[in-house]
Image (cartoon, grey):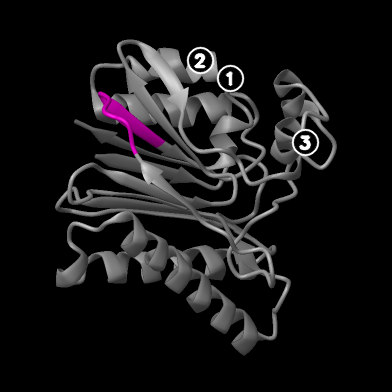
């Protein structure tokens, strides 16, 4: 596995945070919100909390319920820091976790950081964004192909650290050749078809570099973070 994170070409700092476990057991990625300092703090706390729990001996091969608890504890940690900083309602983060389970590998997420699976030359989005635009698609108010340009498409319906909107989704990751975890700094700027083409890159490190470069070549309007897991 490998990861890359870049502040992009417009933002003054990088509010994304990512960690790949040295033993290959989990990856944690977060995209912070709240402007200078607050977003960085929120994403770093969420990642640190999740990693600390996933390293504990009793959860080395977690089940879905345990992974859900990992995300809940991370949310609690971000919320407590927001209270301490008097930033309640002003700082939050997405969180995306992939972890080896007892039988199959698992994922858990809050927000719009995405998990994709790549197999036999095809890319499939596994997570569903927790956004106003995705909710409009789910309710039949707009077509799926209208989601990228929908009003308020970046407004999150679920996030960590913000009062009343935390809700995590947990599921089994499909069997595949590679998994891609990314912040919206990649998925907003690079079309799924191009991501799919890049995922065919044989060398994993080159693949990560090319994904990052694709986002930067398209303006790098946001922080961009990618992590790859190869099986």
Q: Residue at x 70, y 53 (%)?
A: 157
Callouts 2 and 1 close, C-beta under 8 Å = yes
Mark 1: few, some, or many residues within 10 Å (few <14, many ≥20)? few
Relative image position of residue 225 (x, y in whole percent):
47, 43
Which sits earlier in the primary sequence, circle 1 or circle 3? 3
Compared across the picture, whether 103 is left or right of 86 comes to: left
* Mark closer to the observer (1, 3): 3
Which of the labelled discs sits on residue 117, or is there none? none
Callouts 2 and 3 close, C-beta under 8 Å = no
State yes or no: residue 176 in magenta.
yes
Give the main secondary structure, helix, strand or loop, of the magenta stretch: loop
Compared across the picture, whether 210 is left or right of 135 comes to: left
Between 213 and 180, which is closer to the camera in this rendering? 180
Q: Determine whether the residue tagged by mark 2 lies in a helix, strand or loop.
A: helix
Relative image position of residue 32 (x, y in whole percent):
58, 59
Residue 177 found in image quarter: top left
Which of the labelled discs sits on residue 194, or is there none? 2
Which of the labelled discs sits on residue 136, or is there none? 3
Q: Residue at x 30, y 25 (%)?
A: 206
Mark 2: few, some, or many residues within 10 Å (few <14, many ≥20)? few
* Mark closer to the observer (2, 3): 3
The residue at which mark 1 appears reads as: 191
Relative image position of residue 131 (x, y in whole percent):
69, 45
In this view, 161 is above or below 22:
below
Which sits earlier in the primary sequence, circle 2 or circle 3? 3
Compared across the picture, whether 129 is left or right of 168 comes to: right
The residue segment tinted magenta is 173-180
State yes or no: residue 141 in magenta.
no
Q: Residue at x 51, y 15 (%)?
A: 194
């Amino acid at each position: 596995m490998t990861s890359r994170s870049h502040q992009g070409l417009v933002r003054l700092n990088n509010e994304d945070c990512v960690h790949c476990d040295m033993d290959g057991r989990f990856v944690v990625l977060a995209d912070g919100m709240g402007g200078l300092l607050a977003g960085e703090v929120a994403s770093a706390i969420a990642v640190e909390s999740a990693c600390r729990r996933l390293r504990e001996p009793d959860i080395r091969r977690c089940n879905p319920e345990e992974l859900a608890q990992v995300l809940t504890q991370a949310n609690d940690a971000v919320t407590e820091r927001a209270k301490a900083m008097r930033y309640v309602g002003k700082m939050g983060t997405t969180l995306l976790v992939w972890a080896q389970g007892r039988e199959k590998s698992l994922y858990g997420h809050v927000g719009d950081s995405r998990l994709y699976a790549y197999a036999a030359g095809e890319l499939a989005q596994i997570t569903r964004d927790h956004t106003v635009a995705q909710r409009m698609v789910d309710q039949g108010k707009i077509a799926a192909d209208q989601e990228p340009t929908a009003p308020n498409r970046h407004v999150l319906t679920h996030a960590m650290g913000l009062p009343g909107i935390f809700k995590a989704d947990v599921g089994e990751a499909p069997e595949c050749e590679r998994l891609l975890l990314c912040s919206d700094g990649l998925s907003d700027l690079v079309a799924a078809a191009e991501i799919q083409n890049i995922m065919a890159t044989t060398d994993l490190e080159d693949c990560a570099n090319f994904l990052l470069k694709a986002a930067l070549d398209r303006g790098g309007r946001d922080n961009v973070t990618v992590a790859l897991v190869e099986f």
